[in-house]
Image (spheres, grey):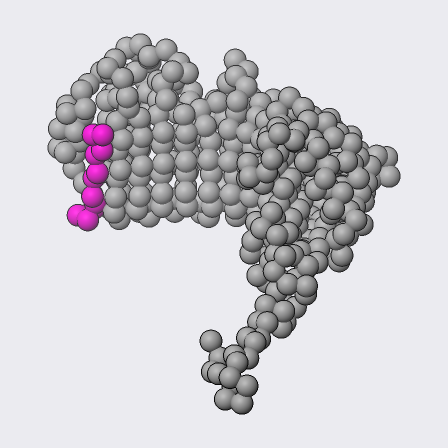
Amino acid sequence: MPPKDKKCGSRALAPDILSNLPDNIIDAIVMLLPLRDAVRTSILSKTWRYNWCRLPVWTIDQALWDVTNNAISPTTRFTNIIYHLLTLHVGPISKFTLSIATLGNCPKIDNLIYFLSRNGIQHLVLQFPRGNLYKLPSSFFTCSQISHLSLQNCLIMFPPAFKGFEKLVSLELCDVTIPSKFIGSLISCCPLLEHLVLHSTITNHIQIRAPKLRSFDFTGKLIFLSLEGVPLLEKLSLVDTGYSGKAGKCGIAKFLESFPALKHLHLDYFSVRFFAGAVPKLLPFALNSLKHLHLSEFSLDELDVASCALYLIKSFPFLQEIEIEVYDDWVEPAGGDVTSEILEKVKSLSNVTLNHLRVVEFAGITGTDPEMQLIKLLLAKSPKLARMLIKPGVGDDTPKSRIEVLAEITQFRRASPRAEVVYKLA
């Protein structure tokens, strides 16, 4: 409290600190708050009353819904929010996120997209409920400043005059319905695109040409995949969710030839199977850039798939990390003859020295002969290995008990004197 005024004996009024803060400080404070709290700052002071109207970043998500009146329908609440946004907001909106799990059809969304297209939107996230596809309006395709775009459960139909997003750097499409012939056109019309995510997007034939693309994450049904003109691609993840019943649709060597800068490669069982055909002994070209290989939901019980996986391990001389997640439910256990052939393929690694391998993670092992032989060779052929983490699989129907697997692994020779083998029993 201020000192007493000796003349009048009363206390002087404290200065109104909130009202005297600079606008840039007020804006910085309001931007750090959730939307609902940011709007509530209007009661703090007259000078704060409409500061929230200048917010350049808006997030309307389930967290906002959970703290509002549940007696009012989500559509009505959303309509009220959009009304205030359209009538009171001043200035550009650089980032907008809409993620409402319970929101049904709402005509105001079209008005919102039109408003954002006229206010310099750069980062747009639209996530709609599953089973309720939202068709993007024509105004969406006029967002000329957009650089980051994430769409979920949307329907995209391109207008004839659409020429692409010239400033788009990042694109994520999840459960988006888009004609196959347009996905390639969309990507090729985004000359600055660096990051691309396609998850369960309804498109079977993918043909991509993106000279600045650095990462590509695909989850869906692989029928046709062409990645050309991607010299800067560093990170590639392919998860094939649609079992086609036929292996070896695409040669792995020809596919990898397009990625001279690739550092991280993630393939699941079905995507490896997609490439597992006539596997050559060695790559006909050098791929020295690859450092991290991740094989998920994988099985060593199928000869073609096991051969392709081992081929990958042998083909990357500067590999530093290997991550394998075993999941044997895809295939029947291999018979005696097949197991013998697989073991011979695994033993072919004995001619290779993994001079740069430092970390190995092996999850879901059950103690099959191919698994144990692979672990044995990785330990024996990795002179710089620092750590091998082994996580056993679950279930009682396994060839060996966990204790038996652990006892056998401890007997394997290690090329690296610093190699630490961690076996997680729990």
Q: Position of residue 117 (x, y in %)?
A: 78, 47
Q: Position of residue 210 (x, y in %)?
A: 66, 43
Residue segment shown in magenta: 415-426
- Residue at the outermost right position: 161
**Left or right: residue 17 compared with residue 276:** right
Count numbered badges in the picture.
Answer: 0
Instruction: State the quadrant of the C terminus.
Output: top left
Residue 362 at x, y percent in the picture: 30, 32
Q: Residue furthest front?
A: 8
* Residue 275 visible from this viewpoint: no
Going 21% across and 34% down the picture, which residue do you hit? 423
Describe residue 136's horizontal placement relative to residue 225 as left or right. Answer: right
137 magenta-colored: no
Q: Please, is residue 372 above or below residue 172 in the view?
A: above
Q: Could you say which quadrant of the image residue 19 lies in?
A: bottom right
> Residue at 27% of width from left, 31% of height from top?
391
Q: Residue at x 72, y 45 (%)?
A: 190
Q: Is residue 424 left or right of residue 102?
A: left
Which of the pair 188/199 is nearer the observer?
199
Expressed as whole percent of the image width and height from the top left, the position of residue 209 reads: 67, 40
